[in-house]
Image (spheres, rainbow, N blue to C red):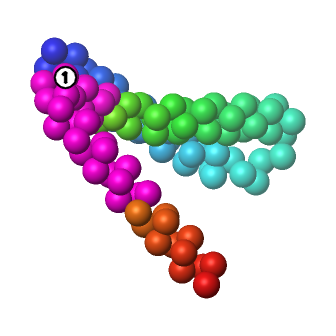
Amino acid sequence: MASVRSSLHDLQRDLYAVARDAEALLKATADISSDKVQAVRTQTESSLKQAHSSLRRTRWQAPLRNAYESTSDYVRAHPWAFLGAAAGTALLLGLSRRRGDSDGSD
């Protein structure tokens, strides 16, 4: 499992390097007005936007999945504590909303 994480981390690092290089290439060719160059620039810019979006999503997937799994494990191990916390939170929210409604209607 650790080797898979390491490989994914290396791949992510390499993709960032490619993206940086592509952005540098786009900047270097900004003043070239050839139709072929402009077509490639447009395609590259689109690909970079998609890659950046994908990399940002990927960066958050593992921590979110870990948090979900930890929470799920806790709820399964301590269902009554979870229900008590949820009920307490609902009570506090209800009381604060009630207090807020009464303050504004005077």
Q: Seen from this angle, which residue lies furthest right?
A: 35
- Whether residue 69 can be seen here: yes
Report the front residue among 22 and 2.
Answer: 2
Residue 4, x across and y down, in percent: 22, 16
Q: Which residues are magenta?
A: 65-94
Q: Which class describes the residues within 10 Å of circle 1: few (<14), some (14-19), or many (20+)?
A: few
Q: Seen from this angle, which residue lies furthest bottom?
A: 106
By secondary structure, the bulk of the magenta-drawn segment is best described as: helix
**44 sits to left or right of 62:** right
- Whether residue 10 can be seen here: no
- Tell me what residue is drawn at x 38 percent, y 50 percent: 90
Look at the image and say whether residue 59 sits in the magenta stretch: no
**32 sits to left or right of 98:** right
- Tell me what residue is drawn at x 25 percent, y 26 percent: 72
Could you tell me which quadrant the C terminus lies in? Answer: bottom right
In the displayed structure, 39 sits above or below 8; it is below
> In the rendered structure, which amino acid carries the disc numbered 1?
Arg
Report the front residue among 29 and 14.
Answer: 14
Residue 66, x across and y down, in percent: 25, 30
The image quadrant of residue 71 is top left
Numbered circles on residues, count = 1
Q: Secondary structure at mark 1?
A: helix
Q: Which residue is mark 1?
A: 76
Residue 16, x across and y down, in percent: 42, 38
**71 sits to left or right of 94:** left
